Image (tube, rainbow, N blue to C red):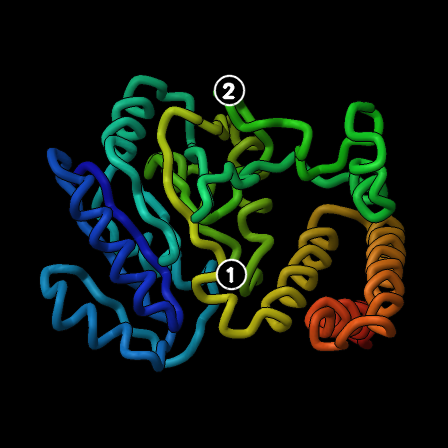
Amino acid sequence: MEISVVIVSWNAKQYLDDCIGSILTEATGLRQEIIIVDNGSSDGSQEMVKSKYSNIHLICNNINLGFARANNIGIKESKGNYIFFINSDVKVLPGSLNYIFEYMNNHKEIGLLGPKVIGLKGETQRSCMEYPTIWRVLCRALAADKIFPNMKIFRSYLMTWWNHDDLREVDVVNGCFWAVRKEAIINVGFLDERFFMYGEDIDWCLRFKKAGWKVVFCPFCNIIHAGGGSSENAPTRFYVEKEKANMQLWRKYHNRYSTYLYKIILTGHHTLRLVGNLTPSFFKKYDMLSYKIDRSKATINMLWQKNS
């Protein structure tokens, strides 16, 4: 088996159908398998896969086990030399799977690779990050990266200054599409299941780099990413989960003083957002900004809960 494709899905039936269709079209010539790990969907996703794609290996979890744990289940079932982790809201564009397979075969030092990610309107999506530091997080919190976009000192970890047009080694490839060498997974270990949703991508990429494997962004292979295939079902909840994972990641790699400082910066960031969104809400319909207001409130509450 050359490649194993692992797709974790939760209530994203139509996205999942489109994703599988694009993979089956583009994986011609490769000895491949597709493993769907469904996290307790209730929208008919499981039934759709069973009836339409009977040859695909479907694993049905009774509950939502989270992204990292579900992907680890897929890894354990995989037989390929490479594992492609693909979000359910992704469509693979022509030639991408074969290009990635050949490129990684010819560059044995690469442990994890990510393609160029294109949105539904044709825009290039940000899919790479630098590792967050206190200074980079502060620059992001104060919007210094936007106010002074051309000043290197104020760049945040989001790499908004980069157009994603050149092949380069990066700190983090975000997890909507990963191509990973099975040998590297054996060396580095599985995804950290303490991360329920989000944060596992930063953690895994950091562990790959610490183990001596390259993490690479390649602009010569493309995918389309709708974004929010599962998270659009509960946007505020998923946003808070993301910020909770960031706190969890910070605790894993930093001391308590640095973690407390990070919490203060994040609180300030969301307080500024809250004030900024509440002010125009007095002059516009509250519903237009309610989502942003609610997520900032929920994030601040989460940060200062007893066990956060």
Q: Give the residue drawn at x 27%, y 48%.
A: 5
Expressed as whole percent of the image width and height from the top left, the position of residue 284 reads 79, 72
Nearest to viewer (mark 1 / mark 2): 2
Secondary structure under tag 1 reads: loop
Give whichever of 217, 62 is nearer the camera: 217
Q: Is residue 31 left or right of residue 240?
A: left
Question: Which of the marked residues, 1 or 2, is nearer the chain's N terminus?
Answer: 2
Position of residue 104 measured from the top left corner of the image (x, y, whole percent): 33, 25
User: For mark 1, does the 10 Å Cα neighbourhood hold few (<14), some (14 to 19), or many (20 or more) residues?
Assistant: some
Q: Quadrant of residue 161?
A: top right
Compared to 112, does 73 lie above or below? below
**Toward the viewer: 24 or 259?**
24
CA gap between label 1 and label 2 equals 32 Å
Quadrant of the rendered structure where residue 179 is?
top left
Locate residue 278 relative to residue 240 in the image: left or right.
right
Mark 1–mark 2 CB contact (< 8 Å):
no
Q: Give the side of residue 80 with respect to residue 266, left or right.
A: left
Residue 25 locus on image (x, y percent): 16, 44
Q: Residue at x 45, y 40 (%)?
A: 122
Q: Is residue 200 above or below residue 145?
A: below
Classify mark 2: helix, strand or loop: loop
Instruction: Work out whether residue 106 can be spotted.
Output: yes
Residue 65 placement (x, y as % from top left): 45, 71
Q: Amino acid at mark 2?
A: Asp
Marker disc for residue 166: 2
The numbered disc on residue 243 is: none
Residue shown at 57%/62% (left/top)? 194
Amino acid at pointer 1: Glu
The residue wearing badge 1 is 193
For the point 54% across and 28% down, the residue is 164
